[in-house]
Image (spheres, rainbow, N blue to C red):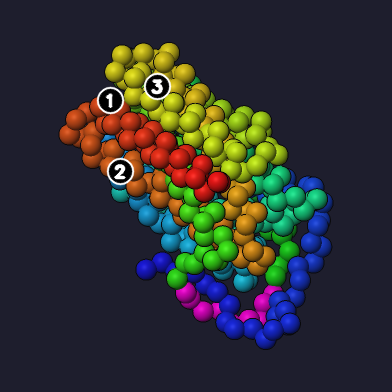
Amino acid sequence: MPFHLTAARRTPGRDHRSPDPDPRPGRWRFWAVAYALLILLTGTNLPTPLYRGYAVEFGFSSLVVTLIFAAYAAVLIPSLLVAGPLSDAVGRRAVLVPAVALAALGSLVFALAEGTAWLFAARILQGAALGAASGPLTATLTELEPGGDRRRAALVATVATAGGLGLGPVLAGLLAQYAPAPHVLPFAVELVLLVPAWAAIATLPARRTHARWVPRRPQIPASMRTVFATSGTASLLAFAVIGLFLTLVPPYVAALSGSGNLLLGGAAVALMLACSALAQLTGYGRAARRLESAGLPLLAAGLVLLAVAGTVSSLALLLVATVFAGLGQGLVFLGGLTAVNQAAPPGRQADVLSSFYVVLYLGVGVPVVGVGFLATAVGLLAAVRYFAGVTAALCVVVLLVLARTRR
C-alpha cells in the first residue's frame, strides 16, 4: 500500500529543523516556481494530440490510449503520496530537482519512441515526475507568496495547472501539424523549456532536518476531514472531465468534424482549459464553497451539452459544451484547492496537498479507463455520452451535499 513519511515523536517545544534561509526572497522566486509548475504540466500533456498518430504508426486502439494514460496515473499517485511528506522533511529542493530530471527523461523517451512500450515507459517517467513535483511545488508557492496570502498562492497554482494542461496540447498540435518531425520536435522544445525550470528549483534554499522519519499510511488531519471529503469529491469530478478531454475528446472532435487536423483536437482541449483559467481569475477572492457551488452546475451543463453534441453531430454545440465545462471545472478546482489549502495545518501543507492531488489524478485516470473499455463495446461517441450523463448526475448530487453541509 502507498504510504506517507512522517516525523517520529518530537520533544514538545523544540524545533528539530533549522529554518530555511531567506524565507521571503521576493517575487522573482515565487513566479519562477510557478513557471516550473506550468512547464512540467505542459510536458506531461504534449502527447494528447499525438496519440492518433502513434496509434496509426504503432497499430493500437483507443483502449490502449486510455491504458497508457492509466499507467501514468498509476505511477503518479504513489509518487504523490511519498514525495509530499518527504519534502516537508528534507526540503523542497531535494525532492524537486530529481523530479525535473525525471520529466526531462520522460520527454527524451517520447522523442526517441520506436514502439508502444516506449510510450508506456515515457508516461511512467512523466507520472513519477509530476507526482513528485505537484504537492511540493504548490506548497512552495504558498511559502514563497510575498504577502503570505494562501488564497493568492492557490490561484497561481490552479492557473498554472490549467495553463500547462492547455498549453501542452496546443503546442504539440501546432508543431505536429505544421512543423517537421511531429513526434520529436514537441519534446525537444519541452527539454529546452525545462532548463530554466530546473534553474529555478536549484535556487530554492536547502532545509536540514535532524528528525527521524518513518513510513505511515496517508492521513488527513481530523480538523479538516469534512472539508477534504467534500472538496475532494467535487474536484475529482472536475478532473474526470479533464481526463476525458485529454484522452478521448480529440478523436471525438475528429469524428464530429471529419477533419484530421491535429491542431483542432488540441485546440478543443486548450479552449476548455483556457475557460478554466479565466473562471479562476474571475473567481479569485470569493469564498471557496461559493466557487464550488457556482462551478458544479456549469460543469454539469457542459457535460449534458457534450452528450447532446455527439447525438446531433454538432461541432458548434461541442464548442459551447467545452466553454461551459471549462468554466465549471475552473471554479470547482479553485474552490476545492482554496478550501483544502486554507484548512491544512502548518507543517502538513505538502502532505495534505499531495493527498488532494491523489484524489484529482484518480479522477483523471480511473474513469477514463472505464470509458476506453466502454468505447470498444459501444463506440467512442456513445461511450462519451454515457460518461457525460453519469458525471453530470454526480455533479448535482455533490452540489446538494455541499448545500447541506453549508447549512
Residue 185 image position (x, y, % from top left): 50, 34
Dot 1: few (<14), some (14–19), or many (≥20) neighbours within 10 Å?
Answer: many
**Element on which disc 1 rests:** helix
Whether residue 151 appears in magenta in the rendering, the answer is no
Q: Amino acid at mark 3?
A: Leu
The image's mark for residue 381 is 1
Residue 313, placed above or below residue 194? above
Q: Residue furthest bottom?
A: 11
| Residue ID at (54%, 54%) | 227
**Element on which disc 2 rests:** helix
The image's mark for residue 305 is 3
| Residue ID at (29%, 38%) | 371
The image's mark for residue 103 is none
Q: Amino acid at mark 1?
A: Leu
Residue 328 image position (x, y, % from top left): 52, 32
The image's mark for residue 369 is 2
Which mark is nearer the camera, 3 or 2? 3
> Is 64 situated left or right of 7 in this image?
left
Nearest to N terminus: mark 1 or mark 3: 3
Residue 348 image position (x, y, % from top left): 61, 65
Residue extent of the magenta highlight: 208-216
